[in-house]
Amino acid sequence: MSSFFDSPEFHGMAAGGKISHDPGMGDRMMRELAPFLKAEGVDIDDPNAAFTEAEFHAAMEKAQGEYNRRLFNPVGAHRGLALGALRSFSLAFADGDIKRAEAVVTSLPSDPEDFKPSVAQVTGAAMGLVDEWFTDDVHGPKLGGVMAPKWSAKKSRAVARDILALAHKGRVVDSLDRLINNNSGRPVLEGAMLAVAAAVVRLTKRDKVSAEQVVDELMPLDGYPEPVAGTYGSTGHVNHDVQEAQDGPAAAQELPEWLGGSSAEATAQANPNADRRGVDERMDEVEKTVYEMPLYQRFRDWLAETYDDVDEDSEVFDIAHLLFCIAVSSRADIDEPEGIDDLLDVLESFAVDGQEEAEKTDGESPSTVIFLDSLEALDNYLRFRMDTDESPERWNSARARAEAASMRTDPLPSALMAAVEANALSEEQLAQPLSDNRLVSGVAGILEWIGDSRQVTGTGRVKRADIAEAAGQFGINAVGVASNARYEDGVNYARSADEVPVLEAMWAVMQSAEIIEITGTKVRPAGAADQWRSGEVSADTALPVIGAFIYERLLDVVNLVPGEDFAAPAITIAQRLIEIITPDAAPERPELDIDEERAERLSALLADELQELAELGLLRVDGETFSVEPVYRRIVAGAGLMLLAGPRE
């Protein structure tokens, strides 16, 4: 019987460039897809079948989706075999035996065999597991801030980072097609397996149990039937997307030993033809390359002009030299913004090493020092490029990625970032009105109170005589007085609007959100006012404004603490926020250099502010225990991250 590929319809499509046909691969694939196409009403083995090109493509899309679902969703004995491979990989990783972990990956066949799961089956099983674990009420909070572990293939590690971010939203399986199309199959396989292993290692440390106990709990093998010989025959089918291996440019370059990278022995085994010269000679070669780079010389000149109070022996030049040596060693082309991603991947490996070393010893590890120094130098380098590049905006996203990298590797901001990622709302939730929110209804009240315009003070604040009416829009009981400012019997007697914290913060936020604008001594509705007038504002519109308000209030707490140090109060507040948002996943409280008087003042101010946020409905309070409504968790975590970013310039 002739096939669809022999028909005039197919050849017409091919001639028009709509279909390309590889006789070997295509026929094998179509044999696999034929039952699924037939279920959609397209019988490609029937020469008399009548279907249009549009019907064929629609059926093909559905058939391919169902085919992939089954391909990546092992059942029965092969589900057990896939879990067995993931158990072996995770246990090897937990033991630090990377060669054994790599051997598990390379042992996986492209097609399922009687006693071995396929690459696709292991990939699909791993994706389903991380979706389940990271959204689980018990395990999910403990997995906040899990980082992609080190791996020889840089692209696979990047996929692991992508998967770990998606896992907090339970969207890994749904993103399978995108991940495969963007990265090919091998990096997705390794990335999914790395995500599983990273979760196992985190839970091992967090629960203080053995890795064997964790995999027995998370990946039990009970209940799966034994594989049977003859279940899978030789079909000749090869999934080229999944089988495609990662080639040279995508592989991570080994760092020289003198920069804390892989050992010379491991490098020699990985590449027997590599240059075996001594460490000192290789170091000299890298440094010579750096000193001869015009880019490096321009950067040093910029540093000398920017830091006019330093000499040639200053640390700022030392860490710049270190950064360029790492870039040269890892072959990261930092002359272009895209190369910053490659460099950050290398730097992050030092951070991972530092975390592992810190768990074994007390004090800061050399790897952590290298990471922190390099990030500081990278921040200088990116400012240099933005100051001197003809198109400085090209470097904006690179600088944002560098700032995010510094947060990902520190326990507190890492936990806050994980909370931000884990609490993203769906498009449907974002489209819903944010009901019963005092700030949202207060903005609508302020706009009605303003009308077309209203007089304000010379500094742009609400006039003293108007404080009661303006504050009342937000449910705040305040009265303007000429003297004797005080808080008495639940009433805030204020000499000016800046002594009414909620009103002052919302007034500033409404201006930055372009809800109101100040012109001279008048306030008027601004461009965004119309969507706020009714008080029926979508969560997508309202939450950023509420988040900015929370940040303003917390920033005010920091500024009211005596002393010049911004960091200690900001870290204390951010730590308290993550303990409220995800108490089970909060890192240990850091030791801070803050005296008892300042600590007590901060504690009192923060307690008052948390109580006020609870009264506004943004937090819940039960006795002395605070929690956050799910809809607000993301913006509360974001406010903590903004505090950690440092004082506004």
Image: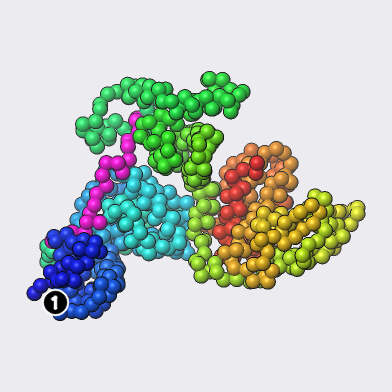
Q: Where in the figure is residue 58, as x and y percent of width and height? A: 30, 72
Look at the image and tell me in which quarter the N terminus lies.
bottom left
Q: Residue lying furthest left in this view?
A: 1
Q: Magenta span has 249?
A: yes
Q: Is residue 311 above or below residue 319?
A: above
Q: Magenta span has 178?
A: no
Which of these two is toward me, 304 or 87?
A: 304
Q: Is residue 350 visible?
A: no
Look at the image and tell me in which quarter the C terminus lies.
top right
Q: Where in the figure is residue 121, as x and y percent of width and height? A: 26, 61
Total numbered labels placed on residues in the image: 1
The main secondary structure of the magenta stretch is loop
Tell me which amino acid carries mark 1.
Pro
Q: Element at badge 1? A: loop
Q: Where in the figure is residue 550, as x and y percent of width and height? A: 66, 56
Q: Is residue 460 above or below residue 291?
A: below
Which of these two is toward me, 36 or 568?
A: 36
Which of these two is toward me, 49 or 116?
A: 49
Q: Is residue 162 above or below residue 382?
A: below
For residue 462, side relative to residue 40 (left or right):
right
Q: Where in the figure is residue 596, as x and y percent of width and height? A: 70, 42
For residue 214, side relative to residue 143 (left or right):
left
For residue 24, side relative to residue 150 (left or right):
left
- Neighbour class for label 1 at 10 Å: few (<14), some, many (≥20)? few
| Region of the chain picked out in magenta, as a range | 236-257
- For image coordinates 55% across by 69% down, the residue present is 431
- For image coordinates 60% across by 57% down, the residue present is 636
Q: Is residue 589 visible?
A: yes
Residue 242, quarter of the rendered image: bottom left
- For image coordinates 53% across by 20% down, the residue present is 312
- For image coordinates 44% across by 28% down, the residue present is 295
Residue hosting label 1: 47
